[in-house]
Image (cartoon, rainbow, N blue to C red):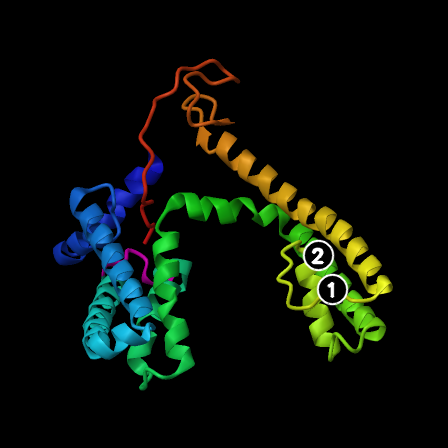
Amino acid sequence: MKDVKLESDHHLHLSVPRKYLNELLFDTRTLAGRVTNWGMLSLIMVVVIGSMVNTVDVYNEKWGEEIHQFERWVLYAFAVEYVLRVYAARNRRHYLLSFNGIVDLITVLPLFIVGDSFVLVRLLRLARVIRVAISFPVVRSLFASLKGSLKLLMGVLGTIGLISVMVGNLIYILEPQTYSNAFEGTWWSLVTMSTVGYGDFVPQTAAGKMLAASLIMSGICMFAMVTAVISVKVGRMINNSAKCVSCNHGIAPDYLYCPHCATEQEQAQPELFEEDDA
């Protein structure tokens, strides 16, 4: 209740246009806010699909210029939206330094870089896809749930990388006629450990095949550890994604009664968007 009062008091310091823009751009509890955010996300998806279509030579010859013009006007719209978000944010510094604010800024950076042929411009366009992803709370919850296991995951992935380098050099020594350098051997060992097996490199000697067999078995174990860590974290996130209205314990959102205090729970519909505290 105190937080709600503080938020209301803070809104009182906003001018009427700024308060209206704040609700329109950030408050997805209102119909206008949901329509605005859904509209911007739909526009982003249209631009992303248009950019992908433009990479096909046949369509690029037909509609390449039209797609570029459309992207340019949409980019102007994103720039205006970013300026309005900075103006309307309750805490501008918080919004500018937040992950959402940084992604919004990266999205409009191509305006300041001349030349569509630059690789940087093409990479910055991918920020639009990131912006769509982070708009859904389940995606943010997924990444947040992995924070506690980040060291373990990095340790396992680092071990996989070290094994790939070691075995890659070893297979190059064993079969220099198959692998022209140690980098190709490292690539082969990583693909073999992941059990993907592209088949671009295949060991020919008995020693090389024995090494590949041991690499496959160790790869199954190593990648199973990564899968297990992620599965446990996601399971905990799903089973504790809601809180009891009485004792505040973490519980599954489909529980009708809290297993800790037996209090009946209110069944709320999940929100696709979370309100941005900006």
| Residue reaching furthest to the left | 16
Q: Residue 59 lies in magenta, yes or no?
A: no
Q: Looking at the image, which residue is at 47% across and 13% down?
A: 262
Residue 130: give x, y in percent of width and height: 39, 59
| Residue reaching furthest to the top | 262
Q: Looking at the image, which residue is at 34% across and 22% down?
A: 266
- What kind of element bears circle 2? helix
Which numbered disc flags the more N-terminal residue, 2 or 1? 1
Q: Residue 174, located in which quarter of the rendered image?
A: bottom right
- What kind of element bears circle 1? helix
The answer to whether one can see residue 55 in this image is: yes
Query: What's the magenta region?
Result: 88-94
Where 119 sits versus 88, above or below? below
Residue 278: give x, y in percent of width and height: 32, 54
Circle 1 packing at 10 Å, graded few (<14), some (14-19), many (20+), is: many
Residue annotated with mark 1: 164
Labelled pair 2, 1 in contact (Cβ < 8 Å): yes
Residue annotated with mark 2: 193
Residue 94: give x, y in percent of width and height: 38, 59
Instruction: Say which of 101 and 14 sits in front.
Output: 101
Hey, what amino acid is under mark 2?
A: Met
Instruction: Say which of 204 and 157 sits in front.
Output: 204
Q: Looking at the image, which residue is at 30% across and 68% down?
A: 53
